[in-house]
Amino acid sequence: MSILEADDVLYSILALVIIENSLEIYIAYRQVKVYRSALDVPNELKAHMSSETFHKARKYGLDGENFGIFKALLMDVLLLCLELYIGLIALLWQMSVDVVERLEWDSSNEIIVSLVFVLISNVLSTFKSLPFKIYKIFVLEEKHGFNKQTAGFFAWDQVKGFLVTQIVMLPITAAIIFIVQRGGDNFFIWLWIFAGVISLVLLTLYPIFIAPLFDKYTPLEQGPLRQSIESLAASLKFPLTKLYVVEGSKRSSHSNAYFYGLWNSKRIVLFDTLLLNKGKPDDSDLSDDEKGKGCTDEEVLAVLGHELGHWKLGHVTKNIVIMEVHLFLMFLVFGYLFKYAPFYEALGFEPGTRPILVGLLIVFTYVMAPYNAIINFAMTLLSRRFEYQADEFAHNLGFEKQLSRALIKLNLDNLGFPIFDWLYSTWNHSHPTLLQRLARLKQLGQPEKKTQ
């Protein structure tokens, strides 16, 4: 293959990176203009949201979006384009070969070199992202009252995160290369099966073994809330086996709830910040800004009614099936394109050097970029549809008012800004906005009122 062909590939990749990120930045800037111009509380929220809280949320959103634009310009446009242009990936690969040779290992063994390459790349990636993490947590989140982490907690969190990532990634990397090398012409089928199995295993094992390394999980104590949740789960035939509260308040004051587990073993996790006063009967240990935050038992039950709606309506299963089909198409394309030499030469590799891992990166990240953008947008639209359906499910359980109150409280507690640019919301939001969800719940309640 000629150098011109490699150059064409390189400039095509650079153009793709610039166009894709420019679109993202343009959409983000549209929302920045909304943050600057929307100065009045929407009529639907005037009874719940004070002008002071509204402007706090506006400033929090504005700071976050400006930070995101700056980070995208620096990391995803300038630095990434520079790395691609100078052939950083090829340099890191050669560095990995040199390390393997210095250790007197077999540098002709692609699996060994790839593992060293992954380790070096992850170290570099960690140090590149670290300043942005520090700024986001200790400047931006701290400024708006959400950060609860100490410097020591953050540092130990990063070390644990890095170690766990390597423990998970390195064996998977070795297996991927082995399958491609030994799988024959149809290796992509075996690769797809392996990826599907690993995805399900990680979905099952992460909450049980990995998540507790970072946060404290304790069983929800006996009481009215636990009894109500267990009764709700039983009425829906949800196979609830464990019910936990996670101490998310040590990390952030943002709140959440979720369930996990496959088949007949499901677990529900509530963030302590979701519960009124963190679920404590005595609020004397809480700071002034924490008192009164969180949802009542009825509102927590409404939130869980929504989450269980996702399960009852098969949203989790549908997402898994879509993910598996998506993976198969990605591996199919990879199987046909990963030997194309100009891809590697465009990134600075010598002719004849075609590492499997780099080929996977090129095909998945750059060749399939337009397809990925379309799929991500389609999944965003589907996710919003699922959210509406789960809200309707909670409504049918009799939680319309409680869910509306919970959504408003969570929005206020998390300083969520209620007004969004239509394009920004359509492109980015996997959930309908607060105002959209409240309007839909109100609409669902109209037939009942007319009947009565």
Image (cartoon, helix red, strand yellow):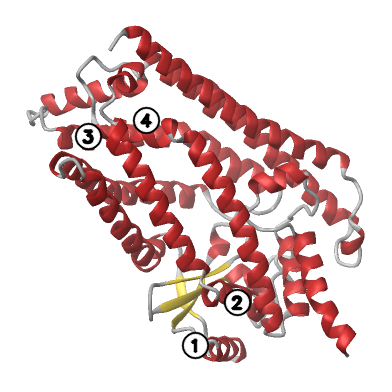
Q: Is residue 38 above or below residue 293?
A: above
User: Residue 146: x, y in percent?
Assistant: 65, 54
Q: Secondary structure at mark 4?
A: helix
Q: Where is mark 1, residue-wise?
A: 237
Q: Secondary structure at mark 1?
A: loop
Q: Where is mark 2, residue-wise?
A: 304
Q: Are marks 3 and 4 in contact (CB under 8 Å)?
A: no
Residue at left offset 43%, top offset 55%: 323
Q: Secondary structure at mark 2?
A: helix
Q: Is residue 267 above or below residue 186?
A: below
Q: Quadrant of residue 94?
A: top left
Distance in Å between CA atoms under marks 2 and 4: 41 Å
Of residues 193 and 160, the one nearer the viewer is 193
Residue at left offset 84%, top offset 53%: 54
Of residues 326 and 294, the one nearer the viewer is 326
User: Of marks 3 and 4, which one's residue comes earlier in the chain?
Assistant: 3
How many neighbours does mark 2 have within 10 angstroms: few (below 14), some (14-19), or many (20 or more)?
many
Q: Quadrant of residue 87?
A: top left
